[in-house]
Amino acid sequence: MWKYIKKYLFFAVMAGLFMIGEVMMDLFQPGIMNRIVDEGVLGIQSGSAGNLHVIWTLGTEMIILVLFGGFCGSMNNVFVHMSGQNIGNDMRKDCFRNIMTFSFRQIDRFGAGSLVTRVTNDITQVQNFVSQFVRGMIRTFLLMFGSIFFMFRLNHKFGLIVLCAFPFLVGCLGICLAKADRLFVKLQIQLDAVNAVMQEDVSGIRIIKACVRELYEKIRFSEKNNELTRTQLGVLVIFAFMNPAVNALMYLVVAVILLAGSYETGSGGATPGTIMAAITYTTQLLNGILGLVMLFQNISRGLVSWRRIREILTAEPELEDGAFDGRTSARGEIEFRDVSFAYPGSGQMVLDHINLSIRQGETIAVMGVTGCGKSTLVSLIPRFYDVTSGSVLVDGVDVREYRQTALRAKIASVLQKSELFSQTIAENILWGKPEASEEEVRAAAVTAQADEFISSAPKGYDTVVAERGMSLSGGQKQRISIARAVIKQAEILIFDDSTSALDLKTEARLYSALKTASPKSTKIIVVQRIATARRADRILVLNKGTIEGCGIHEELMRTCRTYRDIYDSQMGEERENHG
């Protein structure tokens, strides 16, 4: 944490100095009040005659000290917030920056809900921890030990009374904090679970309503929220019992001081002003101890949150970056050399000894039954995952040797699930090429068969897309995603079943326009329809993670059983539909 604190150490030091000033003003005041009562009001040193001049002089002095203490307190708050907010800002940026380097496996392992909680709630807890540490540590310890010190200066017996009670107070705090500390870890984990359910349900609200599962999800959320509430209540109950216990001890100390003071006053060992000052110091000590309670509560929560944040900050990207900048004489050539792949932790091969060469400008259609590894195969090209064995080469270079940014600059991908952002349609398309002109945006949309519906929208290309593209149909989202890939003018285009929501006529126009717009781009298209696959230069058929056939339609009809089965099932459906 020092890495973040040291950048704003000046603010923290200034906050500490102003806090010292504020507390010292608080500690001086009981002594002045002692003199006002004894000398100004009771006139103990002048034959019981009050002294108005002493009252005015010391009263003015006290007002000045209070004003100066208030100024110090205000400046302390300013510098505390400057240090805490800046530290939180840097942590949040670094966490997000590191998350952006995570592999899919790392994101899955943390969980989206947990990552959101860590970057928001946990960093807020750390900010509070830093602020409380800078402000609270100085204030509480100065108040506690300063009160005891000034109490001894005031009257040794009063000081001993407070000192004897001090171990009991600290022991009470220690027991309560030890019990609460274990609950803080549990609390943050349960908050992760609540956020995860909330995120899943908001993202999948359509399917929840379609399946009439609102009641089930309400119950699921309630269970997670009830667990969080029970733990939170457990923490609050601990502190609910602790505060009265500490107060009771301190009031007992006040009672003992009053009792001892009555004897001391009778024997001349103390004055009413001394007793008042002693009670004030005892109250300040109580405030210091209660502040220590809150301080250690925030420290406990802050350290738990810091450990969770540190897991993100210290996590190394699983996909190590190569050094190759992507400059080659070849453009868009792909080769799979004896590639096998299993998802981390599964132990089951999804792809098994794949060997395939794809030439520049070639269009390859990838087909196969569900779960045969089609999406996995194309995800290895932009290196979303690393192969288990073998190698994937782009333009003759292993993808692991590329800088990831250089490799992915060569590739434009349209994934199965169309991801759009809460921006305008034009801005969503410009994700593929941020510097593109309006003409390029429109040309990409024309190629993707999206221009017509975009132009008919009330604000055209400036129409804002709802969160996750909810304001668009499936086909519209797919076409905008395709336009985003087309505008990139990449050497390799990957369409992972990204035209499934388009009708055959629109799909045919799309691929015809794509062939004209990007003739030199290598295209890999994961498809379900035979009619779409037949437009490709070659058709690759996968079965149980292996290549069962590769060639043109007529060849596969003779040699590939899986392809024939797919063809027969689709032709049978067409005959039934037309019948």
Image (cartoon, rainbow, N blue to C red):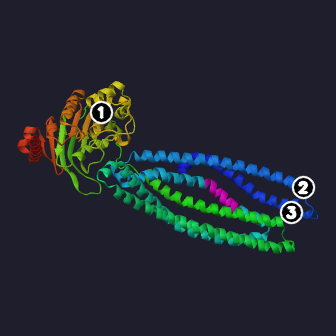
Q: Can residue 141 be found in the magenta stretch?
A: yes
Quarter-wise, where is residue 439 in the image? top left
At label 1, the amino acid type is Ala
| Circle 3 residue | 38
Where does the image place residue 412, in percent across and percent down from the top left? 29, 36
| Circle 2 residue | 52
Q: Can residue 522 be found in the magenta stretch?
A: no
At label 3, the amino acid type is Asp
Q: Residue furthest top?
A: 439
Where does the image place residue 284, in percent across and percent down from the top left? 71, 62
- Of callouts 3 and 1, which one flags the residue occurring earlier in the amino acid sequence? 3
Label annotation for residue 293: none
Q: In the rendered view, does 228 fall on the left or right side of 448?
A: right
Q: Residue 449, relative to residue 195: is it above or below?
A: above
Q: Which residues are magenta?
A: 133-145
Where does the image place residue 252, in percent across and percent down from the top left? 70, 72
Q: Residue drawn at (44%, 54%), measured in percent from left and top? A: 311
Q: CA distance from mark 2 to mark 1?
A: 87 Å
Q: In the rendered view, does 121 fall on the left or right side of 498?
A: right
Quarter-wise, where is residue 432 in the image? top left
Q: Nearer the viewer, mark 2 or mark 1?
A: 2
Label annotation for residue 483: 1
